[in-house]
Image (spheres, rainbow, N blue to C red):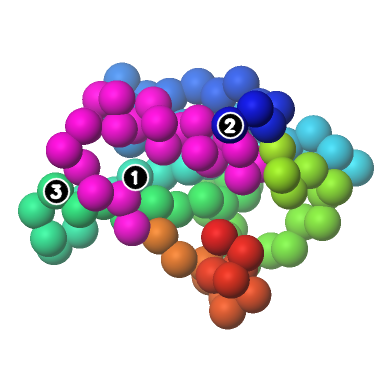
Amino acid sequence: MNYPFYQFTLSGEALRYEFTSVGKQSISKVVIFSTTDLSGIYSLTLANLLPDGSLDDMTINDNGDMETILATVLQCMIAFLDQYPKAIVAFSGSSMARTRLY
């Protein structure tokens, strides 16, 4: 995949990745891989990282860089799977439209 992506930072355990979406505005984003009740299966969350540290996965930013964000999420997933090669990653959108997009 040769799409441009944002540089990201990751936590020591490679479960949390942060980057900044740069389009019409700068928006802090986070990709988090969370364990599930099923062994070896992780849930992927993409959300805005708010100033107070909370997450917002419902806002539509319309920042003009959707392809770059999706490419960044893919790069985060590749980095995660490098650390956890037997993991299975599951994800869906927070709305029907986002699920179709992903």
Query: Between marks 3 and 1, how big is the CA–CA gap?
Result: 11 Å
Q: Which callout, 2 or 1, points at the residue further toward the start of the chain?
A: 2
Q: Which residue is mark 1?
A: 33
Which residue is more in the foreground, 60 or 86?
A: 86
The residue at which mark 3 appears reads as: 40
Task: Look at label 1 and name its amino acid.
Answer: Phe
Q: Which residues are magenta?
A: 69-90
Q: Residue at x 25, y 25 (%)?
A: 83
Tell me residue 74's x, y (percent).
50, 39
Which amino acid type corresponds to the residue marked 2 in the rendered image? Answer: Met
Q: Quadrant of the N terminus?
A: top right
Numbered disc in front, either 3 or 1? 3
Q: Quadrant of residue 27?
A: top right
**Quarter holding residue 15:** top left
- Specify few, some or many for label 2: CA neighbours under 10 Å numbering under 14, 14-19, or 20 or more: few
Can residue 51 be spotted in the picture?
A: no
- For the C terminus, the image quarter is bottom right
Is 75 displayed left or right of 32 in the figure?
right
Residue 91 against residue 22 in the figure, above or below: below
- Crowdedness of circle 1 by 10 Å Cα count: few (<14), some, many (20+)? many
* Residue at x 50% of width, y 31% of height: 75
**Residue drawn at 24 percent across, 49 percent down:** 88
